[in-house]
Image (cartoon, rainbow, N blue to C red):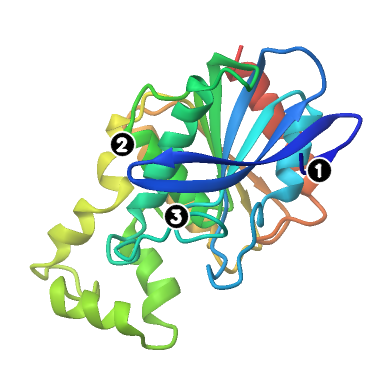
Amino acid sequence: MRERTAAHTSYDVTYRSERFTISGVLNVPTGRGPFPAVVLAHGYIDPAYYVRGQGMTRERGSLAQAGYVALHVDYRNHAESDDDPASQRNFRTGYAVDVVNAVNALRGSDDVPVDDERIGIFGRSMGGGVVYKVLEMAPGLVDAGIAYSPVSTLEADNFNQFNRDGDRDAFVDLVQQRWGLPEAKGRENDEFWESISARSHLDRITEPVLIVQGRFDDTCPPEWARATQRAMERAGVDSQLELYDDGHAFGPQYAASMQRIVAFLDKRLT
């Protein structure tokens, strides 16, 4: 046991994802259950400094307070999870696989009082991108998805914002050599960047999606969220975009945004 409050009990947990053991933190509401559940996908934190359960502690607590089992996934290469040396060059697709398997682990557990028919996924920043990928990779797996201050559904946007414009590293060199940098429209590598982007596969999503975005976000620009939601509408996805006067991390509007998120979950996971 990690922590106990009047509202929930928190545990350090592990589960299997492909050939990897993945660590995480599980909050279980006080009571008999079965409870609806939400799997949490955290944003980018340097794996060298990341500690178990970091990045969505307050969200995990808010969800447990609202009566949801909340499983925070550390991802491969993080905390006590096994290492995957191919993770970055695969554009972290393995993170989405880890979230898929977290859902499966909850459904397969006899020890956690989860209602198997009421499970959602919730990711912030980079984790919002993980949510998009899970929804298009595994339609029908969950009942709802939430992207909070999310990255773009175009991988070229994300690469240019977070990799290309930073310090030059081996990953940027690998991308340039193998696929080409996403610099100019009409280049032969456009097909590659489109193929790895969730934007190209939104028509596979069958679950409702809520996007929550700060208007003053200078890490993941609001236009990314607007463009994604417009693309979802064109693809026939049941989607909503809620904008708040806040930044990337959500401070003053955190409580209001979580009330909206819980209301969405209450409606969709019934």
Q: Which mark is residue 76?
A: 3
Q: Position of residue 194 (x, y in %)?
A: 21, 55
Q: Position of residue 210 (x, y in %)?
A: 55, 35
Q: Residue at x 15, y 80 (%)?
A: 177
Q: Residue at x 24, y 72 (%)?
A: 182
> Mark 2 — residue?
137
Q: Is residue 230 visible?
A: no
Q: Which mark is residue 223?
A: none
Judge whether 86 appears above or below 11 on screen: below
Give the mark nearer the N terminus: 2 vs 3. Answer: 3
Amino acid of disc 3: Arg
Asked whether, in this view, residue 175 is left or right of residue 30, the answer is left
Cα–Cα gap, marks 1 and 2: 31 Å
Give the mark nearer the N terminus: 1 vs 2. Answer: 2
Amino acid of disc 2: Met
| Secondary element type, mark 2 | helix
Q: Which mark is residue 255?
A: 1
Q: Residue at x 51, y 26 (%)?
A: 144
Q: Position of residue 258 (x, y in %)?
A: 74, 38
Figure quadrant of residue 207: top left
Figure quadrant of residue 203: top left
Of labels 3 and 1, the one closer to you = 3
